[in-house]
Image: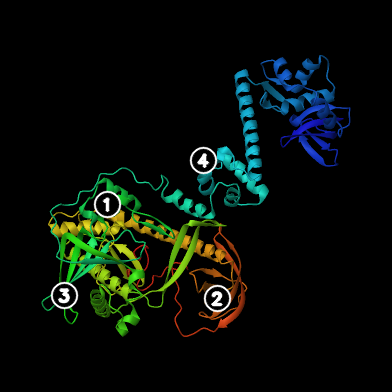
Amino acid sequence: MNLLFEEDGAFKTGTILTDNDASLQVETPHGKRLKLKSNHVLMRFAQPGAGDLLDRAETEAEGLDTEFLWEVCGEDEFGFAEFAREYFGHEPSPVESAAVLLRLHAAPIYFHRKGRGRFRKAPAEILQAALAGLEKKRQQAAAVERMRDELLAGQLPEELKPLVRQLLYKPDRNRLETKALEAACAESGKSPARLLLACGALASSHELHFDRFLFEYFPSGTDFPAFEPPVAPADLPLADVRAFSIDDAATTEIDDAFSVTPVDGGWRIGIHIAAPGLGFGRDSSLDAIARERLSTVYMPGNKITMLPDAIVEGFTLGEGRDCPALSLYLDVSRDLIVTGNHSRIERVPVVANLRHHDIEPVFNETTLAEGGPDFPWKAELTLLWELATVLEAGRGKPAANQNLVDFNFSVDWSETTADGPGRIEIGRRSRGSPLDKLVAELMIAANSTWGKALADAGIPALYRAQTGGKVRMTTAAAPHEGLGVDCYAWSSSPLRRYVDLVNQWQLIGWLSGNAPAFPPKSPELIAAMRDFELTYAAYAEFQRGMERYWCLRWLRQQGHPAMSARVLRESLVRLEVIPLIFKVPSMPTLPPGTRVQLAIDSTDLIDVDVRATYLETLAPAGSEPIEIDDEDLQEAEAAPAADAPVATTEAPPAA
């Protein structure tokens, strides 16, 4: 005798070896012996053989109409054998009974299981809802397949066009569009970024990286909301000075300017800082904008300003204007000793915006040593440089690391290359030039002097402190060992950094005799400090990433030529002509500082990676120090003079 039974959700057959009423010994068609409980048996039969029943039943079941079965069965619970008897109108054969069982079991939407071999007809309303759900899934599956096929054919489906950013940077795996993209990626072997770029969803690889940053930090876009126009005080006194600024040619946020006024026994040196804090205050709509952005974002060929262009234009220290400013005046003797200082809120006549490319050819270490040609502002610049040298010596710390090189990135967006819009030029500039030292030392003087003044007045401010090599933000006036000053409050870039704007409001309160914008122990001040640190670090990381991207674009423009590099450590090298650091696995172990020649094999603008092969050693390691950008190497230790301002390009005020 044979039997049909259910085990682990599947129907099986076997031949009875022994029958003990409550249990049975069974041998399957494959020779496996089992012990079954009697209540697991669904049907006993003599013919056909155990190995043939299910095959013949499946064939028979194909001729049974599920919808017709649902229509003819009753509303009450039933067993498959009794239903087979009603359906066929006679005592069903084992094959017929098994066929009905298989058809009922295969249609759970139509027939709900109530036990082994027992079912109940699904109510009409539940059945219709289930069928509608099935149809929806079928249509969704067809849509996914269609979108996948379009992506594989290099076409961007209409449904994906408004979702490109989300699909790339924060995909919702429950969406059909995401499933289609994942299916296309799996079949093509491409990443989502490469596939969408091939489909024209992105204008270039640059858009991929730039949009990733915008998606996270500017989800609503970079346009500014409506704001109340600022109102600068109309009764500010006019300073009796002729101020001039020193900046890169592309700089529009001119925060600082200088003046030199002869007085009995020496000079009065003016350090003038743009004062947007006079035009709007805390809790204004412009404060909300600056508080949200916290800093201007810099990158090669572009920037996202902290304040609207109209506000920047209104408060920048532009040539030919009388500009609202906070001024720090240093009383300097003829032997260049600072004998005193005082601060004012005033309007400052700015008579010149000097630019690096104009001044450096005639004002540099060589011209200072040899006399050099005459040019406007030569006397003032020379005096300020001599003062800067004295101030630097007094601090016992250099204003800038003389061994570092700054790289200027210039993108010509009017040109288009094979990699997309923009042609990149990268120039080198040694840090620590006379102009650098001049600007850096005067900024250090202003930030440290004003920081101490606020601390002495008991007015809270935001300071940069460095102890044990670690730079941090704090609300307490603490030493900055890297700069050799007792305290250092960022105050010189209020158009670019929220911290500086906050400190400017505190200075305005101190100088005007009013209550400070942020009182002592202000939780809002601490929150702003913490948010700024996180955001400023993220902006800096983005800038470094985009500079790396443009370095690869530069290599591609040059046709991947062989390049010389310096060994930093192990297999890590840095190219000499551009600031690109990467690993060369094929390079033998060489001492840091060794000059090597590399073949640039390939560059990847999606992963922002470069592959190179070691060719030869050009020169052994010398005795000169190796300058390594700790941030690029993702090391925690800060550079000794990490907070010294650097006046090389329109870049973020130095970290």
List x then y, in percent, for residue 88: 81, 16
Amino acid type assigned to the residue bearing label 2 in the image: Ser
Q: Which residue is mark 4?
A: 162
Residue 430 is left or right of residue 10, and the answer is left
Front residue (pair 604, 189) = 604
Q: CA distance from mark 4 to mark 3?
A: 62 Å
Report helix, strand or loop for mark 4: helix
Report helix, strand or loop for mark 2: strand
At horizontal 85% and vertical 29% (from top left) the residue drawn is 56
Q: Give neighbour class at mark 1: few <14, some 14-19, many 20+ (Cα, 10 Å).
A: few
Q: Which residue is mark 2?
A: 564
Q: CA distance from mark 3 to mark 1?
A: 41 Å
Mark 2 and 3 residues: CB-CB less than 8 Å, in contact?
A: no
Q: Sequence-wise, which precedes: disc 2 or disc 1? A: 1
Mark 4 and 3 residues: CB-CB less than 8 Å, in contact?
A: no
List x then y, in percent, for residue 600: 60, 69
At horizontal 30% and vertical 50% (from top left) the residue drawn is 310
Front residue (pair 17, 308) = 308
Q: Which residue is mark 1?
A: 524
Q: Quadrant of the N terminus?
A: top right
Q: Which residue is mark 3?
A: 267
**Location of residue 160 by image quarter:** top right
Amino acid type assigned to the residue bearing label 3 in the image: Trp
List x then y, in percent, for residue 466: 32, 70
Q: Which circle, 4 or 3, is nearer the viewer? A: 3
Which dot marks residue 368? Answer: none
Q: Sequence-wise, which precedes: disc 3 or disc 1? A: 3
Q: Sequence-wise, which precedes: disc 4 or disc 3? A: 4
Report helix, strand or loop for mark 1: helix
Q: Give neighbour class at mark 3: few <14, some 14-19, many 20+ (Cα, 10 Å).
A: many
